[in-house]
Image (tube, grey):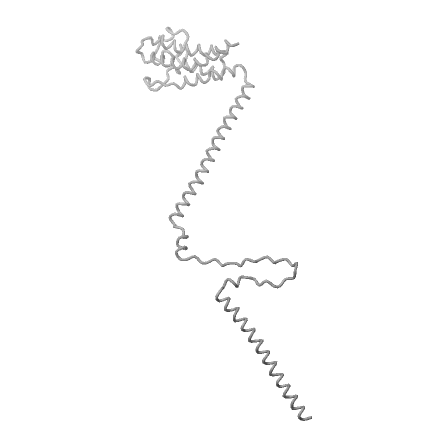
Amino acid sequence: LEEASVRKKRLDVIAKQLREKEKGASDRAKWTKIGKKGLSLILNPDSSAKATVPDRKPGTPTPAKTTPKTTPKPDTPREAKRKRVDPEQERQAQIEEAKKREKVLRERLEREEIENKRQIERDREDQERRERSLETPRDALHRLYEPIFAALWEIEFAALGNTNPFRMVIDASNCVDMGVPDYCDIIEKPMNLTFVQTKVNKKSYESLQEFLEDVDLIVKNALKYNHHPDNPYHIAAKGFQKKFRKLARPLVKSLTKGMGSK
């Protein structure tokens, strides 16, 4: 029995040694595999990006491949210098941009100004139409002759000290004081722009012909009393007459044409 017990112990020791050898061989194989994989990663780094595909059963869909993220390489000093903006170029670019904005703003303001002027003109025309629709015959007549009178009133003669002698009132009550005592003996019906102005402001003229005859009488009286061609008042009367005819001719012509077409 003692001998059998000894043999059993020996067998147990031998079995234990065999198990330890098998375990050591397994560990050596494992470490050998890890070493080979590490060597492969060192020699071929891209192989690390490949995902390990597990065993799939038949009919199992293939998983989508994932693209590994790549870290952008930092710029080299030369590339960084090339990308750096020149301060002078940047300033010029800002100036050009400011000029463009200013041009756009100026064009917009010009368009708005033109449109405002057009609107003002339209409003003025509308106002005139409304006034004309309400005006009396005398109002309509006044609208015709008043611009002519205003232009004649503003005339000034350089030879007479930039004055207009046809505004002066000369009649029987003041001809002596005015230095022309014989004026009323020569001129039967005195006429002047001041007298005409009163009738214009009161809209007293009942016809255009009446207005034209009063202005024409101013010229006739001046030429009659200052009959000498070299007299400065005679010369002024000629200039006044020329201006008067130039202003009245288009109006008379348009009215005559309108009457002829009826």
Image x and y of residue 105, in percent: 46, 38
Residue 8 is left or right of residue 120, and the answer is right
At a point 54% along the width and 21% down the height, the residue shown is 129
Q: Quadrant of the N terminus?
A: bottom right
Q: Nearer the viewer, residue 41 or 57?
A: 57
Establish if 144 lies above or below 116. Answer: above
Whole-percent x, y for residue 26 in the image? 58, 76
| Residue 66 located left or right of residue 157 | right
- How many discs mark residues in the rendered view? 0
Which residue lies most toward the right here?
Answer: 1
Vertical comparison of 2 with 46: above or below: below
Q: Quadrant of residue 107?
A: top left
Residue at image coords 63%, 62%: 56
Q: Nearer the viewer, residue 247 or 29?
A: 29
Q: Residue furthest left?
A: 230
Task: Report the front residue among 21 and 262.
Answer: 21
Q: Residue furthest bottom?
A: 2
Q: Is residue 27 above or below residue 107?
A: below
Place of residue 147 in the rendered image (x, y in percent of width and height, measured from the top left): 45, 18
* 168 or 261, nearer to the observer: 261
